[in-house]
Image (cartoon, grey):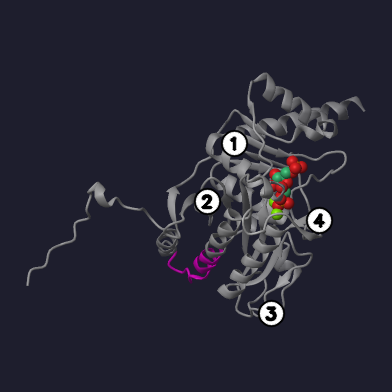
């Protein structure tokens, strides 16, 4: 009996399809000898739910799942049907997976206790980001943050488990439902992006070790509320215009963030006179993207302090967000600080 060693074929007739998300998670898990596989399973559960939500978003116009659901959420926003569908799909996947004890969701007023005595993890999630773009076929997303609970497994869930600053995240990521669907995540060891191959039902590694360019020429801000911006920010926007930077604003946080992460740029959702804490939510929007930004060499602040160091005080609290290329975030902070100091000196 002859035995020969396997030599991988390099022939283009059967090109390699690449590394699947499952295999990548397994490979990375092996990097941590004490890893128990629970976080890996949790990431797989999120990937599964995102495949289902991807299917729903793709056929939203056909299957009568576009449009309003007819209820408002705790933010006072009218829920879209896809907000509710995505919320059900992710919460169900996290419950069935068995790794999670509690979920904080944009679409639920209170913390959801999954009645899972063995769950080690807490997930904060924006099931559907960019809701205003659902019915107009513009990229939308999902954003998630993962924490290890602070209290012993099996004990009642406490504020301590939920109200953790972003620097306590063990993983974070987003799904972008765009011209292609991508899952981008970090477990604190760099950022990797996977593209969904619909026909095979698999995510494949397409953007290994993503790095945010140090600087950029794109600024993303909704200037519709310009008159309510603080003076320092107005000066930074003039600076961007003097520099002939490109203004790009999709109105879906995940999509704007993703573009700027790849090309270099800054996304700003500022404080305004009407909304002094801005619009975006700390626990399930800002923290996750801030962790990814920093893991890719970018930066994220509320204009004055690092997002990841903010101690949360309420479930749906909002924060101004300045995120993207580190030099651009630093420059924006500089303008805010300089104007604040100048005003203070005048008084
Ligand atoms: O319409 P505005 O005020 O520019 O706000 C757009 C921002 O609001 C959001 O839609 C808020 O997120 P949700 O859609 O998850 O509520 C962001 O995705 C987006 O960046
Ligand atoms: Mg959102
Ligand atoms: Mg949302």
Work out whether 191 lies above or below 100: above
Label 1 neighbourhood size at 10 Å, few (<14), some (14-19), many (20+)?
many
> Mark 3 and mark 4: span between their CA atoms?
30 Å
> Mark 4 and mark 1: span between their CA atoms?
29 Å
**Residue corresponding to mark 1:** 325
Q: Is label 4's Cβ within 8 Å of ligand 1?
A: yes
Q: Nearer the viewer, mark 1 or mark 3?
A: 1
Question: Dot 1: what SS?
Answer: loop
User: Camera-side residue: 191 or 49?
Assistant: 49
Q: Which quarter of the picture shows residue 323?
A: top right
Who's the residue at 55% across and 59% down the image?
Answer: 55
**Residue corresponding to mark 2:** 181
Q: Is residue 266 left or right of residue 320?
A: left
Residue 335 is situated, as x and y percent measured from the top left of the image, at 74, 29
Q: Is residue 136 left or right of residue 233?
A: left
Q: Nearer the viewer, mark 2 or mark 1?
A: 2
**Residue corresponding to mark 4:** 75
38 in magenta? yes
Disc sitting over residue 155 in the figure = 3
> Mark 3 and mark 2: span between their CA atoms?
38 Å
Task: Tell me, yes or no, whether the two marked residues, 2 and 1, touch with CB atoms within 8 Å.
Answer: no
Residue range corresponding to the magenta coloring: 32-46
């Amino acid at each position: 009996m002859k035995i020969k060693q396997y030599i991988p074929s390099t022939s283009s007739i059967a090109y390699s399809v690449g590394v699947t998300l499952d295999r990548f998670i397994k490979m990375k898990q092996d990097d941590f000898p004490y890893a128990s596989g629970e976080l890996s399973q949790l990431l797989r559960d999120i990937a599964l739910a995102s495949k289902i939500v991807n299917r729903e978003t793709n056929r939203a116009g056909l299957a009568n799942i576009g449009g309003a659901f007819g209820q408002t959420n705790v933010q006072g926003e009218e829920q879209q049907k896809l907000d509710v569908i995505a919320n059900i799909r992710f919460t169900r996947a996290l419950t069935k997976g068995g790794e999670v004890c509690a979920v904080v969701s944009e679409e639920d007023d209170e913390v959801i206790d999954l009645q899972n005595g063995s769950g080690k993890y807490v997930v904060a999630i924006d099931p559907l980001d960019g809701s205003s773009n659902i019915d107009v076929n513009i990229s939308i997303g999902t954003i998630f943050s993962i924490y290890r609970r602070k209290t012993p497994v099996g004990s009642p869930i406490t504020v301590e488990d939920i109200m953790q600053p972003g620097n306590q995240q063990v993983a974070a990521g987003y799904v972008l439902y765009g011209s292609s669907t991508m899952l981008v995540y970090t477990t604190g060891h760099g950022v990797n992006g996977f593209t969904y191959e619909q026909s095979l039902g698999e995510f494949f590694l397409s953007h290994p070790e993503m790095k945010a360019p140090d600087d950029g020429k794109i600024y993303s801000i909704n200037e519709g509320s310009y008159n309510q911006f603080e003076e320092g920010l107005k000066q930074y926007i003039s600076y961007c215009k003097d520099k002939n930077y490109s203004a790009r604003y999709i109105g879906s946080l995940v999509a704007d963030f993703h573009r700027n992460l790849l090309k270099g740029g800054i996304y700003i959702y500022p404080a305004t006179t009407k909304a002094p804490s801005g619009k975006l939510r700390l626990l399930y929007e800002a923290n996750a993207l801030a962790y990814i930004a920093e893991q890719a060499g970018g930066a994220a602040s509320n204009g004055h302090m690092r997002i990841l160091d903010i101690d949360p005080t309420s479930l749906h609290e909002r924060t101004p967000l300045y995120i993207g290329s580190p030099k651009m975030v630093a420059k924006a902070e500089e303008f805010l600080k300089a104007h604040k100091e100048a005003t203070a000196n005048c008084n």
